Image: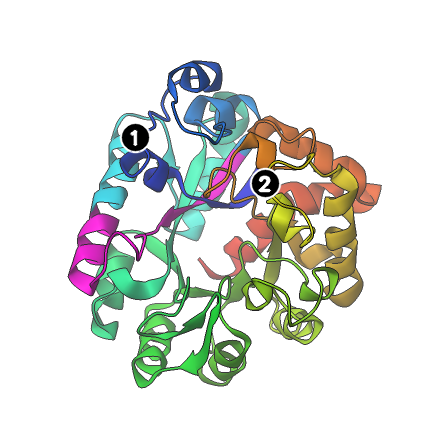
């Protein structure tokens, strides 16, 4: 079973107007956007992606206040519930759900979703964390750019007082913390406050991306941050956007080779071990097929990444590591 720790599925449905229940080839015929789609539910099923972390992400440029973001996230959650009611996905809410899914998946290939809030603005105040847990959310990433809770991509800064409250509420609710997009100052402050499970669903080593002074540098993880995640038993998912694999790449250039992915995987593994390395593709997260490395054209192509790692690490990197991380705390 392949596990992809970051897909903006409902955003693609509601904000981009894509019908993800279609076969991928059919969606590509209908889609009128510049980015070629990579993910649909049938493509996940056919490609052996048995579980993904599906986001609730309210674009801050479109949803400019907490209530608007809250409304948008609720609408995205309803997309996932409709799919669940139709038997197109399973939403994982507990360890029991996860084990049951792993037993059933080889026969029926129905993909499972773990619900992740990306960017905390849809959480109107920290006391709302319990509500979101009851609604099925199991991870929260407080940052995207800067939010009311902490600094984020291209907008640095630490935790705000509200952010400290949020992390305490997450601890109490037993939710996991996703460091993706979080500025480094907020990262270190979060480690002092938060005691629960941690990960970075879709982030790469900053040291392979030109260091601290390059565009989007604080979007990624310093080696010290990676080590700290490993010490807490956390996971790091490799994000597969070409620009996040090679900071000299730009749209319109030739696609990178899979060797670029391999470099990032090996770098993280050298720091914290292959058992803490996974995938967080972010496919269709503001880019499309031509912005992925060569050969990553659909979800099933993630299996090719298994050929880039040591044979004994293949099962873990493709999905087993994320499954074991989830089972420890769900």
Does residue 73 belong to the magenta stretch? Answer: yes
Residue 86, given in percent of the width and then of the height, sits at: 27, 25
Q: Is residue 273 above or below residue 33?
A: below
Q: Tell me the element at label 1.
A: loop
Give the quarter of the image for residue 303.
top right
Q: Which mark is residue 251?
A: 2
Q: Earlier in the sequence, mark 2 or mark 1?
A: 1
Does residue 41 belong to the magenta stretch? Answer: no
Quadrant position of the C terminus in the picture: bottom left
Q: Residue at x 38, y 23 (%)?
A: 32
Q: Residue at x 37, y 16 (%)?
A: 30
Quadrant position of the N terminus in the picture: top right
Q: Tell me the element at label 2.
A: loop
Segment colored magenta: 50-74
Q: Which mark is residue 51?
A: none
Q: Which residue is mark 1?
A: 17
Q: Residues within 10 Å of mark 1 (few under 14, many from 20)?
A: few
Separation of marks 2 and 1 at Cα, in angstroms = 23 Å
Q: Residue furthest right?
A: 310
Q: Is residue 328 shown to the viewer in this render?
A: yes
């Amino acid at each position: 079973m392949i596990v992809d720790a970051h897909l903006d599925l409902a955003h693609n449905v509601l904000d981009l107007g894509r019908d993800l229940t279609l076969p991928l080839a059919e969606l590509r015929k209908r889609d009128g956007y510049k980015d070629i789609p990579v993910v649909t539910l049938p493509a996940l099923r056919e490609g052996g992606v048995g579980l993904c972390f599906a986001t609730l992400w309210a674009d801050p440029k479109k949803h400019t206040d907490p209530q608007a973001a809250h409304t948008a996230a609720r609408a995205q959650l309803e997309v996932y519930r409709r799919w669940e009611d139709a038997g197109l996905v399973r939403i994982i809410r507990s360890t029991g759900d996860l084990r049951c899914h792993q037993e059933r998946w080889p026969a029926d290939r129905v993909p499972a979703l773990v619900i992740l809030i990306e960017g905390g603005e849809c959480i109107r105040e920290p006391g709302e964390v319990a509500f979101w847990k009851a609604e099925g959310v199991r991870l929260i990433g407080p940052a995207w750019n800067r939010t009311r809770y902490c600094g984020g991509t291209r907008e640095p800064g630490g935790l705000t007082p509200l952010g400290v409250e949020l992390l305490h509420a997450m601890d109490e609710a037993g939710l996991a913390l996703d460091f993706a997009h979080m500025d480094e100052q907020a990262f270190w402050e979060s480690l002092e406050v938060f005691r629960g499970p941690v990960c970075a669903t879709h982030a790469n080593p900053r040291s392979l991306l030109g260091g601290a002074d390059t565009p989007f540098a604080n979007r990624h993880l310093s080696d010290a941050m990676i080590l700290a995640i490993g010490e807490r038993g956390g996971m790091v998912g490799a994000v597969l956007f070409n620009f996040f694999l090679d900071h000299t790449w730009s749209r319109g250039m030739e696609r990178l080779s899979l060797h670029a992915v391999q470099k990032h995987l090996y770098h993280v593994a050298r720091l914290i071990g292959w058992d803490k390395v996974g995938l967080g593709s972010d496919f269709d997260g503001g880019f499309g097929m031509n912005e992925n490395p060569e050969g990553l054209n659909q979800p099933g192509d993630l299996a090719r990444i298994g050929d880039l790692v040591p044979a004994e690490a293949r099962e873990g990197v493709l999905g087993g590591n994320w499954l074991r991380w989830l089972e420890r705390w769900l």
